[in-house]
């Protein structure tokens, strides 16, 4: 399993989103508070964001987030209004190089997967960034189209009923999250919205998104849909 977060709003520094919160991704890499499977997320990390021209930029590593001093020195001066970041706990048997670390991208969307899925349910694709399960799932989501992500998740879950398929996706104007085997939480701030695997602090304004739901954030607000009744 992994931990991830997405921010949509006014530009914030990557450090303020990833490293500075008291229970943010940095702490979640070694002491997550809500993670149900696995104790650490030490198998790499990644940050992706949209630049001022809408281009996708990424920085990924196979090292633990807490041990990457070069990223810590640069993160305060990187800023964006659309950011997706993740720390990784690799599924057993999967590669641990940086190409297997989220976020993955099709050039428009950034995607992170928190969970595990059998490779029989996500067959190899030439356009996948890695042979790891998360990269293969991302490639299938991108191939079907981001708008059809729920349908892709349902089909993969049919092929692997034991899969955990929690997704966070972001582009320049929206966040899409899918809970399938775990929860997400979101916090509405005056300058934007953050959606995350778990709250980065104890602010009572955090709202939990239950399992089998879709959450969408746009500049207009937050919409949560129950996938069991949709």
Image (cartoon, rainbow, N blue to C red):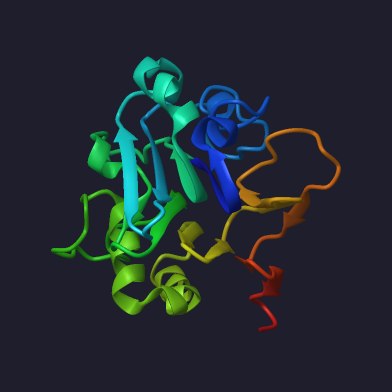
Q: In this view, does 43 lie above or below 127?
A: above
> Residue 192 location, x and y as percent?
67, 53
Q: Which of 162 and 36 is in front in this view?
A: 36
> Residue 178 location, x and y as percent?
56, 64
Name the residue located 23 percent from the left edge and 34 percent from the top edge. Answer: 97
> Residue 51 location, x and y as percent?
39, 51
Instruction: Name which quarter of the figure residue 43 lies in.
Output: top left
- Specify the farthest residue to the front: 52
Name the residue located 45 percent from the left edge and 73 percent from the top edge. Answer: 149
Total tally of numbered discs in the picture: 0
- Specify the farthest residue to the left: 126
- Specify the farthest residue to the bottom: 230
> Residue 155 location, x and y as percent?
42, 76
Instruction: Name which quarter of the figure residue 35 lies in.
Output: top right
> Can residue 162 be seen at all in this image of the molecule?
no
Q: In this view, does 92 lie above or below 229?
A: above
From the viewer's perspective, tell me whether residue 73 is left or right of residue 35.
Answer: left
Q: Nearer the viewer, residue 155 or 144?
A: 144
Name the residue located 27 percent from the left edge and 63 percent from the top edge. Answer: 120
From the viewer's perspective, tell me whether residue 119 is left or right of residue 228.
Answer: left
> Can residue 74 be seen at all in this image of the molecule?
yes
Name the residue located 52 percent from the left edge and 66 percent from the top edge. Answer: 173
From the viewer's perspective, tell me whether residue 197 is left or right of residue 97.
Answer: right
Q: In this view, does 88 lie above or below 176?
A: above
- Specify the farthest residue to the right: 204
Give the quadrant of the C terminus: bottom right
From the viewer's perspective, tell me whether residue 104 is left or right of residue 203.
Answer: left
């Amino acid at each position: 399993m992994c931990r991830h977060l997405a921010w949509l709003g006014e530009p914030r520094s990557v450090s303020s989103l990833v490293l500075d919160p008291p229970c943010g991704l940095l702490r979640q890499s070694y002491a997550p508070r809500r993670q149900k499977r696995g104790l650490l997320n030490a198998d790499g990390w990644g940050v992706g964001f949209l630049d001022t021209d809408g281009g996708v930029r990424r920085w990924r590593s196979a090292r633990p987030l807490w041990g990457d001093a070069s990223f810590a020195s640069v993160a305060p001066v990187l800023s964006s209004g659309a950011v997706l970041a993740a720390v990784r706990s690799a599924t057993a048997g999967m590669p641990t190089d940086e190409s297997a670390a989220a976020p993955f991208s099709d050039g428009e969307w950034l995607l992170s997967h928190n969970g595990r899925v059998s490779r029989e349910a996500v067959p190899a694709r030439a356009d996948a960034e890695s042979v790891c399960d998360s990269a293969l799932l991302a490639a299938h989501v991108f191939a079907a189209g981001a708008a059809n992500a729920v349908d892709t998740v349902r089909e993969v879950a049919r092929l692997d009923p034991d899969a955990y398929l929690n997704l966070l996706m972001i582009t320049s104007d929206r966040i899409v999250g899918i809970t399938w085997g775990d929860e997400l939480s979101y916090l509405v701030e005056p300058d934007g919205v953050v959606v995350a695997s778990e709250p980065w602090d104890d602010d009572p304004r955090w709202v939990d998104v239950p399992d089998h739901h879709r959450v969408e954030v746009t500049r207009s607000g937050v919409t949560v849909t129950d996938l069991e009744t949709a």
